[in-house]
């Protein structure tokens, strides 16, 4: 985060069955830290639509890797 960066506040509503994944840069780093890492993370989220399964999968990836940073993920899914 930039100490002098500007931030704005906003809001949105998850539609039924939508999932929101919030993660630290440690997860980004597990996939190489390059621009295509976001595509890998999105694919991972689509392959594991159940929030508990997605968190378990991310935890397993983090445990198996030699991470140099923490890996944090929050998954929220609105029920249909």
Image: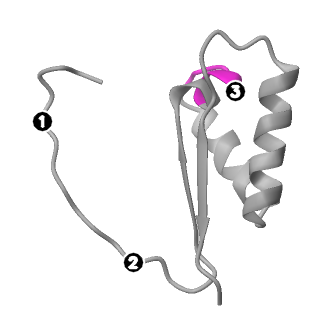
Whether residue 33 appears in magenta in the rendering, the answer is yes
Which residue is denoted by mark 3 in the rendering? 31
Q: Which residues are magenta?
A: 28-34
Which residue is denoted by mark 1 in the rendering? 6
Which secondary structure, mark 2? loop
Q: Is residue 61 toward the left or the right of residue 34 in the image?
A: right
Give the alpha-carbon distance from disc 1 to disc 3, as whole Å: 28 Å
Q: Quadrant of residue 41?
A: top right
Depth check, mark 2 against mark 3: the one in front is 2
Of residues 70 and 12, the one drawn nearer to the viewer in this rendering: 70
**Which residue is located at x 70 percent, y 40 percent?**
40
* Quadrant in which the N terminus appears: top left
**Which residue is located at x 66 percent, y 20 percent?**
32
**Which residue is located at x 22 percent, y 62 percent?**
10
Which secondary structure, mark 1? loop
**Residue 6 point in image, percent of width and height:** 12, 35
**Callout 1–callout 3 Cβ contact below 8 Å:** no
Which residue is denoted by mark 2 in the rendering? 13
Numbered badge on residue 65: none
């Amino acid at each position: 985060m930039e100490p002098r960066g500007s931030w704005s506040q906003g809001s949105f509503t998850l539609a039924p069955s939508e999932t929101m994944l919030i993660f630290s840069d440690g997860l980004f780093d597990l996939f190489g830290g390059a621009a295509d890492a976001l595509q890998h993370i999105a694919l991972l989220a689509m392959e594991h639509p159940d929030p508990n399964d997605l968190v378990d999968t991310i935890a397993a990836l983090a445990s198996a890797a030699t991470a140099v940073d923490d890996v944090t993920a929050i998954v929220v899914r609105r029920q249909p």
